[in-house]
């Protein structure tokens, strides 16, 4: 072995990536309260002030999405089972009315889900939707606490109702908030593509945008498209049920209230909090 092969540089190259990986894993597994002192700082705060958490645009977008999701669920079930009930309105056939409502509700939902809600929630209201290292730490700890393996992070529930003026964001989010947004976006993308794939197969001369969005029709047969569409639909229903369940828990009712009225009574974490104590 030459001197250059046994020098410090060679050792650094061999252990550097491994050390970085170990350091990253350790940082992920570190207790959130040790990695972020804002939890202990929030615990020391006493008073609350009224803070706007969700602006009008985000609230309208959120509840419009909820309405459109229920329209999609209802009309999808009607098309699947052939049970149209009140949709059998003379002179229209229940199937065509359900199909038209299903398609246009899906198109509107894509506009709200992929454009309007992110614009208001992220760019106007300033919420962060990308997963960060702190989110991974909190998700691991909260997941363990939820099933009784560990205690919740001291100050965690207060931190979810605390705004950090210096950081320009809320101190903590429930792990399901960001997770739900991304998974629902992915699953609705699958629903849209498989749905337009089936629609393209059904149309003898589809317009250009149906032909474009229905490109999966050229790769998969309509039976497989329908199976994927139904499976994804059931996954979305399960996620919506979970979303509603977490929203109505006592610890989350202030956050739910803010999605209705916009404001919430929150702690405010400023730069001078440590000096005041």
Image (cartoon, rainbow, N blue to C red):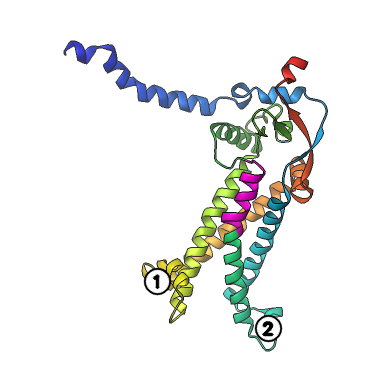
The residue to which callout 1 is attached is 221
- Extreme residue in the front direction: 124
Q: Nearer the viewer, residue 40 or 82?
A: 40
Query: Would you say 142 lies left or right of 24 here?
Result: right
Q: Quadrant of the N terminus?
A: top left
Question: At 56% across and 62% down in the image, what residue appears?
Answer: 233
Q: Nearer the viewer, residue 91 or 180?
A: 91
Query: Would you say 90 lies left or right of 27 here?
Result: right
Question: At 69% across and 88% down in the image, what residue appears?
Answer: 90
Which portion, as a residue range, is magenta? Answer: 112-127
Q: For the residue labelled by badge 1, is the local secondary structure a helix, a strand or a loop? A: loop
Quarter of image, res 139: top right
Binning the other alpha carbons within 10 Å of mark 2 as few (below 14), some (14 to 19) or many (20 upward) gives some
Quarter of image, res 148: top right
The residue to which callout 2 is attached is 88
Looking at the image, tell me whether mark 1 or mark 2 is earlier in sequence order: 2
Question: At 73% across and 20% down in the image, what residue appears?
Answer: 272
Q: Position of residue 202 (x, y in %)?
A: 46, 78
* In magenta stretch: residue 269: no
Q: Position of residue 126 (x, y in %)?
A: 64, 41
Q: Position of residue 234 (x, y in %)?
A: 57, 61
């Amino acid at each position: 072995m030459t001197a250059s092969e046994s020098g410090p540089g060679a050792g650094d190259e061999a252990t550097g990536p491994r050390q970085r990986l170990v350091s990253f894993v350790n940082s992920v597994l570190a207790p959130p309260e040790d990695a972020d002192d804002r939890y202990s700082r929030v615990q020391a705060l006493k008073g609350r002030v009224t803070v706007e958490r969700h602006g009008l645009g985000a609230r309208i977008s959120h509840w419009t999405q909820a309405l459109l999701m229920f329209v999609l669920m209802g009309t999808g079930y009607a098309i699947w089972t052939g049970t149209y009930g009140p949709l059998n309105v003379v002179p229209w056939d229940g199937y065509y009315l359900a199909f038209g409502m299903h398609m246009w509700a899906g198109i509107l939902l894509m506009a709200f889900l992929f454009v309007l809600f992110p614009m208001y929630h992220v760019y106007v209201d300033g919420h962060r939707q990308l997963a960060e290292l702190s989110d991974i730490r909190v998700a691991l700890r909260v997941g363990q606490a939820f099933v009784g393996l560990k205690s919740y992070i001291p100050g965690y529930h207060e931190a979810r109702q605390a705004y950090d003026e210096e950081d320009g964001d809320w101190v903590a989010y429930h792990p399901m908030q960001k997770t739900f947004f991304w998974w629902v976006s992915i699953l609705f993308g699958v629903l849209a593509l498989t749905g337009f794939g089936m629609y393209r197969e059904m149309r003898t001369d589809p317009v250009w945008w149906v032909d474009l969005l229905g490109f999966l029709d050229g790769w998969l047969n309509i039976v497989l498209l329908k199976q994927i569409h139904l499976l994804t639909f059931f996954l979305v229903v399960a996620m919506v049920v979970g979303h509603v369940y977490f929203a109505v828990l006592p610890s989350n009712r202030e956050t739910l209230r803010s999605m209705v009225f916009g404001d919430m009574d929150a702690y405010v974490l400023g730069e001078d909090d440590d000096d005041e104590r």
